Image (cartoon, rainbow, N blue to C red):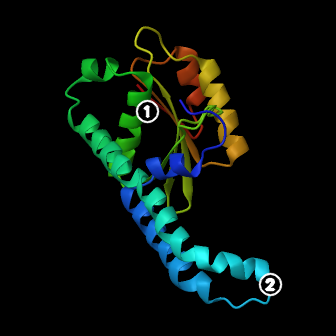
Amino acid sequence: MRRGQPKLFDLLLDAPWWVSVLLAAITYLFFTYVLPHFESSNPFINAFKAAFNYMGPLLSGLLLIPAPFAYFNARRKRKLLDTQSNLDSIKALSWKAFEELVAEAYRRQGYRVIENGFGPDGGVDIKLIKGESVTLVQCKQWCSRNVGVSVAREMFGVMTAEQAEQVIIICCGGFTADAIAFAKGKNLELVG
């Protein structure tokens, strides 16, 4: 898992492939056609103007590198969801693949999905956005034990801190009776 603040390359890998292509095109046009036409009386800036024609293609080429990776990553996630046949196949997934599976399922339901793959997630694995509504999702790929009330309480606190409308906790197993009792009457959905 990547740690710390996400870098531009990491963001482009997780974005749709066309974002890299669009950013590369804008960069090329800016450095090749827009920036060289700015007039300046500063000799230092004028010395760099000749280099702008070369920087456009170079930077654009670098920004295009993530596009095929992003395309195949999105395709892999779609295939991951399509190949699941039963609960046993879902339980066999790694925790990261389980998060990707859940994210893809919500993406197909029309949500804008933000996956947290850049280090400590603060309890939020996936953020779902539909209109003005924000829903936080915590995925627990626990096969041998039930999710307890402490996870439900933590996520309820995160929901309040993030000012989200709802929290969904999704697991491969089940939930304890205390967790189910805690979730009653709250915008806290338990999916097992």
Determine the residue positioned at 56% across, 61% down. 132
Q: Position of residue 157 (x, y in %)?
A: 70, 34
Q: Is residue 5 visible?
A: yes
Query: In this view of the protein, which residue sits in the foreground, 95 or 6?
Result: 6
Q: Amino acid at mark 1?
A: Glu
Q: Position of residue 97 (x, y in %)?
A: 38, 29
Which quadrant holds residue 179?
A: top right
Q: How many marks?
A: 2
Which residue in the rendered view is the most extreme toward the top?
144
Q: What is the distance, in whole Å, between disc 2 and disc 1 at their CAs? A: 53 Å
Q: Is residue 27 visible?
A: no
Query: In this view of the protein, which residue sits in the foreground, 76 or 36?
Result: 36
Residue that badge 1 annotates: 99
Determine the residue positioned at 52% across, 45% down. 10
Residue that badge 2 annotates: 42
Which quadrant holds residue 93?
A: top left
Q: Position of residue 158 (x, y in %)?
A: 67, 37
The 10 Å Cα crowd at callout 1, few under 14, some 14 to 19, many 20 or more, is: many
Q: Earlier in the sequence, mark 2 or mark 1?
A: 2
